[in-house]
Amino acid sequence: MFSVRGVDHFYGEGHVLRSIDVELTERRVAVVGANGSGKSTFARLLNGLLVPTRGDVTVGGFNTRKDGKQVKRKVGFVFQDPDLQIVMPTVAEDVAFGLRYRGLSKSEIAARVTAVLAEFGLSDFRDHLAHQLSGGQKQTLAIASVLALTPQCVVFDEPTTMLDLRNKHHIAKTIRSLSQHVVVVSHDLDLLMDFDRMLVFDEGRIVADGSPKEAAGFYRELMAAC
């Protein structure tokens, strides 16, 4: 799905990603690293939220620098804070929001919204005020609104950080159930241990890349040495 070639990225004079070269084809890829390691910047490059200062990111052959619209159709993005992602007053309206720009009829949108709400256990909340939901319900709504657009891949940036243990388990179960390719950035190693591959970032570089067992072991040793 993803090809990242010769990528460096700067924020002002801050060099946050350095010489990133990686291909991501596995269905579930985990990304870990300390705060400030560059992992969230890397995630935002994958669907064109950011364009690299140097180098190229392609998704299914589409370059994020030139083909942003096509990339965003292929790759959904779920933020750490769902309040940043919920844009409409009610649950049903929020799921419908993105569909309005896909050329669907009103009846098609209504049917898609009903199906998505049922799939994610939100049917009873369709007319509730979205920002009055619990934290776990808000994160579920954010995921549902992204999945309503049928992306081929979903990138999650710290999806469980703001949740209690019960809701962490719920979101983890939701992520595992997805048929799409997923890339998950997280400090929660338990969430990631059954993934197909794990990347470890440190000081803007990928310093380990392998199975979660191997990469997580390297990451724990890296953090213990700090």
Image (cartoon, rainbow, N blue to C red):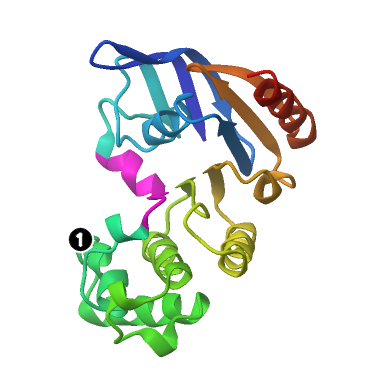
Horizontal side, residue 106 vs residue 182: left or right: left
Tell me if I can see residue 112 in this picture. Answer: yes
Front residue of this view, candidates 180 and 121: 121
Residue 9 locus on image (x, y percent): 35, 17
Which residue appears at 25% of the width and 27% of the height? 66
Which residue appears at 55% of the width and 47% of the height? 182
Q: Is residue 156 above or below residue 2?
A: below
Horizontal side, residue 175 vs residue 127: left or right: right
Tell me if I can see residue 85 in this picture. Answer: no
Q: Which region is colored magenta?
A: 69-81
Q: Is residue 6 above or below residue 224?
A: above
Occupied quadrant, residue 130 = bottom left
Occupied quadrant, residue 198 = top right
Q: Amino acid at mark 1?
A: Tyr
Q: Identify the residue at the far bottom of this view.
A: 124
The residue under label 1 is 101
Which residue appears at 30% of the width and 30% of the height? 50
Please identify the quadrant where the C terminus is shown.
top right
